[in-house]
Amino acid sequence: MNYHGAILILFTGLGTIFFVFLFLNELRKKKVLEKIKQLPFTDEYEAIVARTPHYHRLESTDQLSLQRSIVYFINAKEFMGIGLEVTDEMKVIIAFYACLLLIHKRTENCYDNLKTIIIYPHSVIIKEVKSYGGIYTKEQFMIQGQSANDTVVISWHEAKSESYHMRHNNVIIHEFAHEIDFMDGEIDGVPPIENSKYDGWVHILHKEFNSLNTIAQKDRGWGKYKLLGSYAASNEAEFFAVVTERFFESPVSLKHHFPELYSELEDFYKIDTAMLFG
């Protein structure tokens, strides 16, 4: 056998092994999914979600759909507690708000690419290197949550206090809005949307973001932009995450002050939150 023939056989064999591996992996995932589909949405789970201000306002068909999504999310993701024991309440509440965002997005499973949720008892201090005009400095930041790659970090103290009341802010919604934003490969404030709607989305969001950014830099004349707050002016990605919070937590105010922005979010999430949760 000559050299080139041996190389061909080698690569053919490696290719076969690779495709067999992919096939077996997909088969394993299907078996796991089938097992998850048989798991019940328990009375304990029902009691937990019933305490949220959103669940009982959903139509019964949406409630049932959300129940299945929660069961999948809880059993398909790894939950890690740092300095605390992960409870069913933590799992259910995080899964509920994460999947609520996708309730009408026709996704078979919630956040397939997400693998791990890390839960801290309180806000976390992180260190980052920042550059200002070529000058690099180390800075500390207090965060309530973070989304990065295939992991979401949640501070349970903040998450719990925000989950049972509608208070503008919701750290779970915020971080999973980032996950949705990243579904097209970039965190830039533009989630995966239809090409025909791209220009309208970018125009409205950038217009409001630029207005907010100008006001935040001056720190005066906030007016209606006080609803969004200065953190939303950090960048387009944070703006999208914050307005998603407002869309689900204070939808009537958002619709009143920012009707065009509300309309874009309603069209994207396929849900009229002002009618349901107002």
Image (cartoon, rainbow, N blue to C red):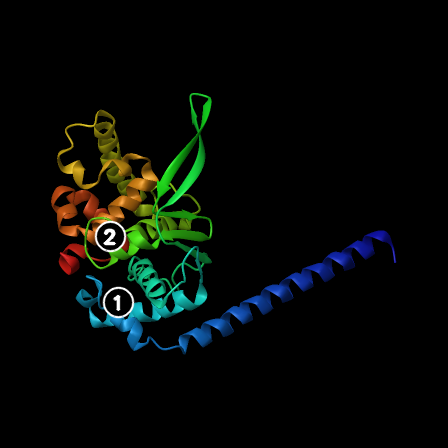
* Residue 269 vertical position relative to residue 68 in the rendered view, above or below: above
Q: Which quadrant of the figure contains the N terminus? A: bottom right
Residue that lies at the very extreme toward the right in this rendered image? 1
Question: Which comes before the other along the chain, label 2 or label 1?
Answer: 1
Q: Residues within 10 Å of mark 1 (few under 14, many from 20)?
A: many
**Residue nearer the viewer, 183 or 84:** 84
Residue 64 at least partly seen = no
Q: CA distance from mark 2 to mark 1?
A: 26 Å
Which structural element holds mark 2? helix
Residue 128 figure quarter? top left
Residue 80 at least partly seen = yes
**Residue nearer the viewer, 27 or 53:** 53
Which structural element holds mark 1? helix
Residue 99 figure quarter? bottom left
Q: Which residue is located at x 41 percent, y 32 percent? A: 139
Q: Position of residue 42 (x, y in %)?
A: 32, 76
Q: Which mark is residue 267?
A: 2
Q: Amino acid at mark 1?
A: Val
Q: Position of residue 112 (x, y in %)?
A: 44, 60
